[in-house]
Amino acid sequence: MAEQRVLVVGGGLAGLAAAMKLAELGIPVDLMSLTPVKRSHSVCAQGGINSVNELTRQQGDSEYLHFDDTVYGGDFLQHQPPVKEMADWAPRIIDLMDRLGVPFNRTPEGFRDQRRFGGTLYKRTAFAGATTGQQLLYALDEQVRRWHAGGMIAIYEGWDFLSPVLDDDGRCRGAIAQNLVSMEIRSFPADAVILATGGCGLIYGRSTMSMACTGSAASRCSKAGVKYANGEFIQVHPTAIPGADKLRLMSESARGEGGRVWVPRKPQDSREPGEISEGERYYFLEERYPKYGNLVPRDIATREIFNVCVNEGLSVEADRQCVYLDLTHISREELDRKLGGILHIYEKFQGVDPREEPMKIFPAVHYSMGGMWADYERTVEGGLVLGSPRNHQTNVPGLYAIGECDYQYHGGNRLGANSLLSCIFTGLFVAPSVQNMMGSLSSSAHDEKYDTLHRGQRAVRQLEHDNLLKREGGRENPYVIHQELGDVMTKAATVVRDNDQLKDAIEKVNELGERIENCSLSDTGNWTNQNVMFTKALRDMFPIAKAILQGALARDECRGAHYKPKFTMPGVEADDPAERRRQAEAWCDAFEEKNRKWLKTTIASFDKEGEPTLSYEEVDTSIIPPRPRLYGLVGAEVIEEVWKGRQANRNGSANGQSEPAPATAAATS
Amino acid sequence: MIAPAHDHHDQPSSFEVRVLRQAGPGEPSHWERHQITYEPNLNVISVLQKIAAQATTADGKDTTPVAWDCNCLEEVCGACTMLVNGQTRQACSALVDKLLADDPSGIELAPMSKFPVLRDLVVDRARMFRALERVHAWIEVDGYGDRGAGPRESQEGQEFRYPLSECMTCGCCVEACPQYAKVELTKHVDETDEQFEKRQEQAYDESFLGAAAISQAMLFNEHPTGHMNAGERLEALMAPGGLQVCGNAQNCVSVCPKEIPLTTSIAKAGRQTTWHAFKRLFDR
């Protein structure tokens, strides 16, 4: 048998963590990336990385509470065992990154400093200025370079993943990829392929994501049979600066360090912000959520900002939606030390000093909670079995998904500073699983008997490429179609969703999907042809775009980032206490009913043309029972009371039974 | 540094962009003119996107989209470095309003001159990543198992390392460096990709490291664990193509988009290598 190798696709945090851990285990790795790995999208992550730490522990925090905050923040849509495992690993992961030399900010005594992030009351977030993602990525990049120098990791930068190679039994034996400079198409035999290819923000045209985040790799896997889960759960970050080419993120850490979001109470007050007194300012997040303040989870902050601008007409500017994100009350010295990176971005791109003047921000598409379906094996205690070949394996044997391109950790809404954690965690955690899976194989994908398979699959991709170059196209322009796709998706499938609008969007996306087949390439050459590579990526945005829209259309409820005003929960508005209580009971009934119906993973399976069909999967909520997600909203206290009463009754009656009652069992009389 | 992006009343309805194009390595280059409709708040990236969508030159001729490199579009990945009006910088943070205010005749875009051009504005900066390997720009940890936290560090220590660690290997410093000469090899007909890459690496290894790699050596020498292997890095700095090539022109520090104190790093490297040479002399 020839030597076994692993192909890692994607050189962000997840891909690099997997590559270095596999190398440590003695497994040779081929690492493939669109860009030089040091330029991967992980560099854009700003705020920090979460874990319980010595200080929060003394305030009662624990791995379990980090786990609880994460599933509560995700509106209980995650399978709980992977999340529990991740929270358990978190402190060790930050220690490791510390040892690798990440310049985390320090306290005067020399300990790692922490700040608070959204959706928690603890200061769990370690950070390196406001460029934490960049710093973590560089540390992993350096380790991978070390293994590269030692010959254990071969790096293929500037290669685009075209498809997985599946044998007759449906097992993945490698991948076909294309060089972005020479346009060469070749096969990469591998005994396991790990996809770490990030999010799909470019489907929305402009987002906070980088230009490489097209989602095309996931889409190309979906056409080969990999399922795509929870596509409709797209995070819209509350605070970004609008731009013609990109919506640039303004980190949640700005609020973590004390930044306040507000609008003038008087609509479009024309005075300078500094001239508007405290009483004339509407700090709407602080007023509505006094417990969490500006650090409510992102889905909630985004909806509130959207609401204050669109429904209440309180946008700071008349012709452009935006609210103030105000840091001017914090000292310059502290701002520069903790938030320098993002202040530079605002300054460079807006030409305004945010230390002097409040920033103007608006929500923007930011993160894909959904992604390729991936398996896990749980322990009796509710964690994951270390080294189980099933962990992070997709439904195609030998094909794994980690990082943002999987769907496991963030449910309906991701908490800030949990993505860097989930990326590094999955990268490290998948390595022994892949090692054990490969140990069970009796051959190597480099064995001669697979040559025909690889040659054949390569030839298919080559023919596709040649045909695309030769095609007598119509006059459709791929860049224009991309813009139209982005407009349709942004209008129909971001903050507020409506079934009529979604149906309309599905039709439009279908039309655009047909028009893309009539694209004429303005470049038909075979050297560094970005035109043809973009057209391929654009074509492959359609399966995922359709999965997002269809998933959103089918899901008639509100959960996390998925919000449909026509399917909101009943109000609790009565003044009379008895009536109020009755309304809260009705609310809780509706909540239980909604969970019975919709506490399920959306799973899209695709045909060869990329047309999705939906099915649903039960969610493992066996550790923490789902509960109303209110974050101390003013006026909703009665709901919490009623819910707690029901839980107490249920626990009381469950004690007498041999089995605990299912979490979503009806408790109404 | 700060662009006054507010006054647009005296802006033209369109402006000219001249791009230095080159079909591939070793091919001749030529200027191509494009006319772009003015909008407020454009940057050079959105100009290049418009050129790609237009697909015609200012003379109305069909043309291929200009090839260029980019990813993050917020000046943190380093990909989109090019010469904008002759200055080395990132295209994403080059704002059109500011550029036109400085030079109303239009905008000129050219590839970096110190690296082999792959096509148009895309260059091959593999030499810079190779330089990081030469200076062992990493921490030699025992392994990735749990061994508790890293070493405690003072705020001063962190504040020294963090700016150095913001280097995104964009290449501005070496583009501006008079001592950093272009290394460009041509692939032989009978050569495989791997053989060509090997030959390139050898050529890179004999050429100047450049400010970015020197500064990274200092970053890791300053870390308590990294310090244990400081000697290896200093040996690399003392080898041919090392620190002694620096002519102290100080261009590097003035063009660094992250304002990294590169000349301070170079001076530090000078002191450390001197001590290292002494030590080596007496250890014999």
Image (spheres, coloured by chain):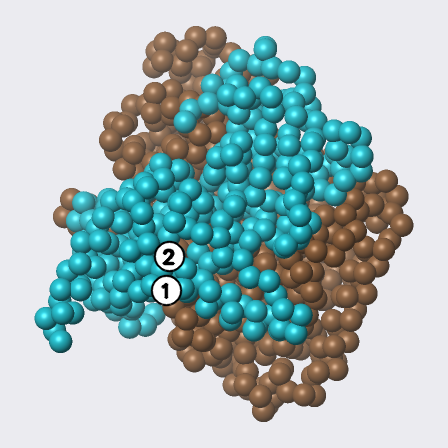
Chain colours: A brown, B cyan
Q: Where is the N terminus of chain B found, in terms of image quarters? A: top left
Q: Dividing the picture into quarters, in which one does residue A284 lie? A: top left
Measuring from the top left, give residue A8's x and y in whole percent.
54, 67
Measuring from the top left, give residue A651's x and y in whole percent.
42, 57
- Whole-angstrom CA distance, mark 1 to mark 2, is 8 Å
Query: What residue did someone put label 1 on?
Result: B134
Of residues A605 and A271, which is closer to you in this image? Answer: A271
Dot 1, how many residues are within 10 Å of its Cα: few (below 14), some (14-19), or many (20+)?
A: many
In the displayed structure, A23 sits above or below A47; it is below
- Rendered residue at 39%/38% (across/down): B255
**In the rendered view, does B246 fall on the left or right side of B26?**
left
In the displayed structure, B66 sits above or below A388; it is above
Q: Does the image show residue B166? A: yes
**In the rendered view, does A273 fall on the left or right side of A161?**
left
The three-letter amino acid code for the residue at tag 2 is Leu
The three-letter amino acid code for the residue at tag 1 is Arg
Q: Dividing the picture into quarters, in which one does residue A459 lie? A: bottom right
Q: Element at badge 1?
A: helix
Measuring from the top left, give residue A357's x and y in whole percent.
38, 20
Query: What residue did someone put label 2 on?
Result: B209
- Rendered residue at 41%/47% (across/down): B174
Q: Are marks 1 and 2 in contact (CB under 8 Å)?
A: yes
